[in-house]
Image (cartoon, grey):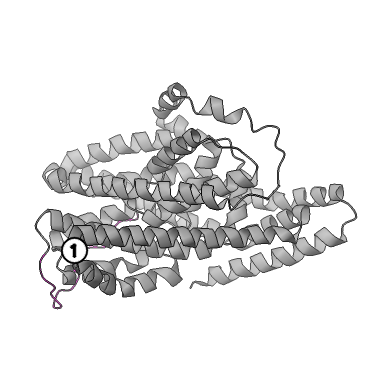
């Protein structure tokens, strides 16, 4: 577990102590609200820094992810089967997150904002006409300047396919996008060093205004999400037994080491070499493993999918925003698109959730409700991503007739995936 995790935990504890002290020592609620507002100024700076990286991050990582698919002959049949699996897995994960958030209601009982300005936000933003019209950018630079995440994704899709079609001529452009992606990865790391301060300020502000009893809701949120992950693991195991038969048990055993590596580090990318090695020892050909696994890091993040819908609904519930089922389904479809291409980036889920909050009229400050415990949540979803990606590679190999017997002599030789 990295050092920043302990700093964030220290900030969380300090924020709880500071908020509790302020809540009981300040003379009235009006004064407490005023103090909380000044505390929130610190965390709002952190929010702006996160928003600063959204556009370039999605643009560069998604271009790299698509560009690394290979030429048209490679994408072909294997690519179609791979993407079909990814889409099905993502849809199941997103819907499971929605279902559990609606059943558990983890954000119910938290009152942190005025309710008067929420009623008219959903109907205007979610008409099909407005959604489609807003989807296509008139200018990339305008989309980047205004942080229009969906428009950036649309341009990135065209750009990634175009770079791939250029072949050798496109390699310098792909390398440039890869360099930009690594630069944004570094910037994200710099921004996240401020997380302990932002956590302290945000938690202190919430408790100062609402009291320490609000912490019970975080426990409910954490437990509810891990219950969601447990159900998702069960679904993946069932899908594995249906697809590759009894060998699913062997695959699970082989993925224990990558799983245990991803969980404490909260990074599924850190376990990539071990996953690739174990897949090839399991019998997945190098051709399939080296193609499916890197794509999975951009397009098949099952744990992250479930988290984005669960967490977004939690924030909406905390602000008392009623989201009809049709709105929730549109939100899930939006998350299906906006979440692609940001794997390997620390706290990428927070970036995706923040963009979604903005589009659906949910206060951006709600992101700070989950920031303090996000490391615990990231551990679970990163480990889940290991299970989902390894199963996807094995399933595609099975579909292609390329799943052979176990071979303990195999060593991983494919390059690690780009930060996509």
Residue 417 within the segment the image draws in magenta? yes
Q: Which residues are magenta?
A: 404-419
Find the residue positioned furthest to the front: 103
x, y percentage for residue 314? 57, 49
Horizontal arrangement in the rendering, residue 81 relative to residue 127 (left or right): left
Residue topped by disc 1: 245
Secondary element at image label 1: loop
Residue 234 within the segment the image draws in magenta? no
Identify the residue at image location x=30%, y=62%.
237
Residue 81, above or below 388? above
Identify the residue at image location x=28%, y=70%.
252
x, y percentage for residue 276? 23, 66
Horizontal arrangement in the rendering, residue 116 relative to residue 300 (left or right): right
Identify the residue at image location x=68%, y=32%.
117
Main secondary structure of the magenta stretch: loop
Identify the residue at image location x=15%, y=49%.
78
Please tell me which residue lies in front, 57 or 347. Answer: 347
């Amino acid at each position: 577990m990295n050092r920043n995790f302990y700093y964030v935990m220290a900030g969380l504890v300090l924020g709880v102590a500071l908020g509790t002290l302020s809540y009981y020592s300040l003379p009235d609620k009006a004064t407490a609200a005023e103090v909380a507002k000044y505390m929130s100024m610190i965390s709002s700076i952190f929010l702006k820094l996160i928003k600063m990286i959204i556009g370039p991050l999605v643009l560069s990582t998604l271009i790299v992810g698509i560009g690394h698919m290979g030429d048209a002959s490679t994408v072909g049949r294997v690519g179609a089967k791979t993407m079909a699996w990814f889409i099905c897995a993502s849809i199941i994960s997103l819907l499971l997150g929605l279902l559990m958030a609606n059943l558990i209601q983890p954000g119910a009982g938290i009152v942190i904002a005025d309710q008067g300005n929420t009623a008219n936000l959903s109907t205007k933003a979610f008409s099909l006409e407005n959604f489609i019209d807003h989807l296509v950018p008139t200018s990339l630079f305008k989309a980047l300047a205004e942080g229009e995440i969906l428009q950036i994704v649309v341009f990135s899709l065209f750009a990634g396919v175009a770079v791939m079609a250029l072949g050798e001529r496109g390699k310098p452009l792909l390398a440039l996008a890869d360099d930009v992606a690594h630069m944004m990865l570094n910037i994200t790391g710099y921004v996240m060093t401020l997380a302990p301060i932002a956590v302290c300020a945000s938690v202190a502000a919430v408790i100062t205004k609402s009291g320490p009893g609000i912490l019970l809701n975080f426990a409910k949120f954490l437990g509810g999400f891990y219950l969601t992950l447990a159900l998702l693991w069960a679904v993946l195991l069932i899908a594995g037994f249906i697809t590759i038969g009894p060998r699913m048990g062997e695959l699970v055993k082989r993925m224990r080491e990558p799983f245990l590596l991803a969980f404490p580090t909260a990074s599924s990318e850190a376990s990539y070499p071990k996953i690739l090695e174990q897949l090839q020892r399991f019998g997945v050909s190098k051709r399939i493993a080296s193609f499916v696994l890197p794509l999975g890091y951009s397009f098949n993040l099952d744990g992250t999918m479930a988290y984005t819908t669960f967490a977004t609904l939690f924030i909406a519930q905390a602000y008392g925003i009623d989201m009809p089922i049709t709105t929730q389904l549109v939100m899930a479809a939006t998350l299906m698109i906006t979440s692609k291409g940001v794997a390997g980036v620390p706290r990428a889920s927070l970036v995706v959730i923040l963009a979604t909050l903005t589009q659906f009229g949910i206060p951006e400050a709600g992101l700070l409700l989950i920031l303090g415990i996000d490391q615990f949540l990231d551990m679970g979803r990163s480990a889940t991503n290991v299970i989902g990606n390894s199963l996807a590679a094995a399933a595609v190999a099975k579909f292609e007739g390329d799943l052979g017997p176990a071979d303990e002599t195999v060593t991983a030789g494919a390059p690690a995936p780009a930060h996509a």
